[in-house]
Amino acid sequence: EEVVVEILDEQGTVIRTYKSKAEEEKAEPDSPFQQPEKKAAPAKAGLNKLAWNLRYPQIEKPKGIVVWGYTGGPEVVPGTYSVRLTVGEWTDTKTFRLLRDPRNETTQEELGEQFALMQEIKSAIDELYETVQRIRSVKLQLSEFGKRAEKAGYGKELQEDADTISDKLTAIEEKLAQPKNESNQDPLNFPPVLDNQLVYVYGYVGGADARPTQGAHERFADLKKELETLLEEYAGVIKDDVAAFEKKVKEKGIPRILPPEGKE
């Protein structure tokens, strides 16, 4: 039976999950100082050991995205946590305390401020990558529909419209993530765009157990404004251009599901 190990915070919210049937992370980490994260839980008969790295889940990047910097999860603050073990229908939960390193003079309040800022930056990065995923999905749908409409005998107009909209979306996507990066060394050759700049600040804030600097707060505020502007541009394309495309499809009476070749 599948083994599931969950880490929960003091409010009972699951913050990490390990499953025996999960695939191990095989992707190359974004920094030489970052270890690949394990996602699988051991499930052999007898005594098993699972090490939690005291962090939230890492940032999930879209396929093909390469950045330079730390993309792991924020480190949790000292406090009370629980671990829940489930095997089939059997489950058990134990509570434990995570203590502050006594050698560290950083206060609980300062660690909490660091954690809150890292969570905020990670949320912005997650939203950025979700938008990249949506842009790619819209572009693919536009391209496929335009090609199928032309093959079905409805002319080239919709294909041309689809290409125009896709160009607008691509321009936004390229400001969100650098499309030329294909390996971990490429960020040295091509200028980092918004995602890598956010990742840099994210890693800077989490680089040591310390209160974030005022400069880190200010830099993130600037990058967040840039992100909001690009998200507004994306929303505008969807609201205006894509809506106009769908209206034209409806006016022409083109069915959403088209045969591969020739009209029905």
Image (cartoon, helix red, strand yellow):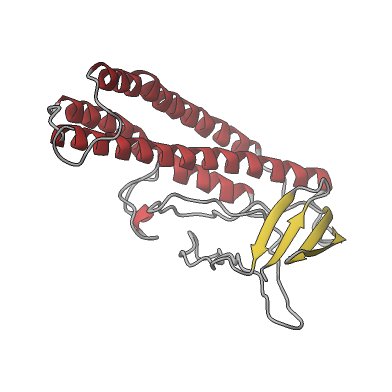
Rendering coords of residue 109 (x, y %): 81, 43
Residue, far bottom: 46
Rendering coords of residue 133 (x, y %): 42, 42
Q: Nearer the viewer, residue 16 or 98?
A: 16
Residue, far front: 264
Asked which quadrant contains residue 158, the reply is top left
Q: Looking at the picture, does residue 77 appear above or below residue 131? A: below
Question: Residue at left 24%, top 30%?
Answer: 162
Rendered-image quadrant of the C terminus: top left
Question: Residue at left 73%, top 53%?
Answer: 76
Q: How many marks?
A: 0
Q: Nearer the viewer, residue 72 or 83?
A: 83
Question: Residue at left 67%, top 59%?
Answer: 17
Rendering coords of residue 249 (x, y %): 26, 22
User: With 234 as the anchor, is 245 left or right in this view?
Assistant: left
Specify whether residue 216 is in view: yes
Rendered-image quadrant of the N terminus: bottom right
Specify whether residue 209 is in view: no
User: With 149 as the anchor, is 34 left or right in this view?
Assistant: right
User: With 245 as the anchor, is 130 left or right in this view?
Assistant: right
Question: Residue at left 51%, top 34%?
Answer: 223
Asked which quadrant contains residue 248, the reply is top left
Q: Looking at the picture, does residue 191 appear above or below residue 84? A: above
Asked which quadrant contains residue 105, the reply is bottom right
Rendering coords of residue 150 (x, y %): 15, 33
Q: Looking at the picture, does residue 151 appear above or below residue 98? A: above
